Image (tube, helix red, strand yellow):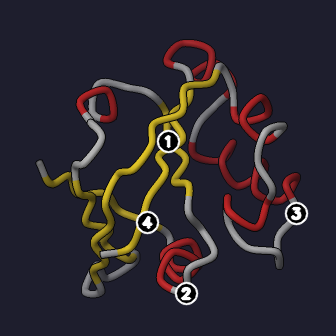
Amino acid sequence: MVHQMKLEGRFFDYIQNGTKRIELRLYDEKRSIINLGDEIEFLKLPDMKDKLKVKVCGLLRYNSFSDLFKDFDISILADKSMTKKELLDVLQEFYTPEEQKKYGILGIRIEKL
């Protein structure tokens, strides 16, 4: 199955250059149907003209982004140019602590195709 997801430009670029190898999302209805071996087509915001396909090679369930961050280095969650705090601040702009508590978190291990 192929899933489509929109992605902010710099995070799209991190996947394209090979540093970001775990995509971070809420474990909501849309993400609960993702399975190992599926593909994700990322559309680069804002214009969504650039596309990038990856294969799902792992699914990691956590209660919060903070919990997941304890187990992984920033170098695979985004890029060494960011700190974990900066990334957490960005994620909390999209996903409130209440949403994280309600749905939980999904770390999607990806490989570029």
The span from disc 4 to disc 2 (Cα, nearest Å) is 15 Å
Q: How many neighbours does mark 1 have within 10 angstroms: few (below 14), some (14-19), or many (20 or more)?
A: some
Q: Position of residue 48 (x, y in %)?
A: 28, 78
Q: How many neighbours does mark 2 have within 10 angstroms: few (below 14), some (14-19), or many (20 or more)?
A: few
The span from disc 3 to disc 2 (Cα, nearest Å) is 18 Å
Under mark 2, the amino acid is Asn
- Labels 3 & 2 near each other (Cβ < 8 A): no
Labels 4 and 3: the sequence-earlier one: 4
Residue at the (56%, 55%) spot, across then down: 22
| Mark 2 or 1, closer to the camera | 2
Among the 4 quarters of the image, the one containing residue 2: bottom left
SS type, badge 3: loop
From the image, tell me which residue sits under label 4: 7
From the image, tell me which residue sits under label 3: 83
- Labels 4 & 2 near each other (Cβ < 8 A): no
Residue 109 higher or lower than 96, as above or below = below
What is the residue that sits farthest to the left in this orientation? 1
| Relative side of 112 to 18, left or right | left
The span from disc 1 to disc 4 (Cα, nearest Å) is 11 Å
From the image, tell me which residue sits under label 2: 17
Under mark 3, the amino acid is Thr
Q: Nearer the viewer, residue 5 or 106?
A: 106
Under mark 1, the amino acid is Arg
Among the 4 quarters of the image, the one containing residue 92: top right
Residue at the (70%, 55%) spot, across then down: 90
Among the 4 quarters of the image, the one containing residue 36: top left
Residue 30 higher or lower than 104, as above or below = below
